[in-house]
Image (cartoon, grey):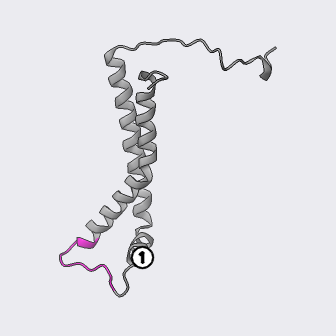
Amino acid sequence: MVTNSDFNFTNNKTVTLELPFSEHIEELRQRIFHTFWIILLLTFIAFLDVKLLVKILELPVSNVKFFQTSPGEYFISTVKISFYTGLLFGSPFAIGQIILFLLPGLTKKE
């Protein structure tokens, strides 16, 4: 029977697992793929409620509104705002994926 007192976290034996180069590339590909889809999902969610984001961006400057000087400019602006919002909120996930990819290759001193 295993209880919580049976665990000894200070004397863990480390298992060294070395992967071939192709496995490292596959893991990197998967992490980039997940990061891309998370940022795309967050961009889509931001695009659904982009009017609120535009109002938030207009708050610091009074009496200034977004206007379009060419056809479709407002649409392109909303897509950019949505993308940058998705990138902003997806960056913690991307940084976490970078850390999770690099951490196994570092020693305790690094």
Q: Quadrant of residue 93?
A: top left
| Disc 1 target residue | 55
Magenta segment: 64-74
Which residue is found at the position 38% from the left and 50% from the top? 40
Which residue is found at the position 26% from the left and 66% from the top? 76
Q: Depth check: give the residue in front, 90 or 98.
A: 98
Furthest toward the front, the residue is 109
The N terminus appears in which quarter of the rendering? Answer: top right
The C terminus appears in which quarter of the rendering? Answer: top left
Q: Main secondary structure of the magenta part?
A: loop
Residue 83, image x, y percentages: 34, 57
Residue 46, image x, y percentages: 42, 61
Q: Is residue 2 left or right of residue 30?
A: right
Residue 34, image x, y percentages: 41, 38
Identify the element where label 1 is drawn: helix
Residue 82, image x, y percentages: 36, 61
Classify 10 Å Cα crowding around label 1: few (below 14), some (14-19), many (20 and above). few
Furthest toward the bottom, the residue is 63
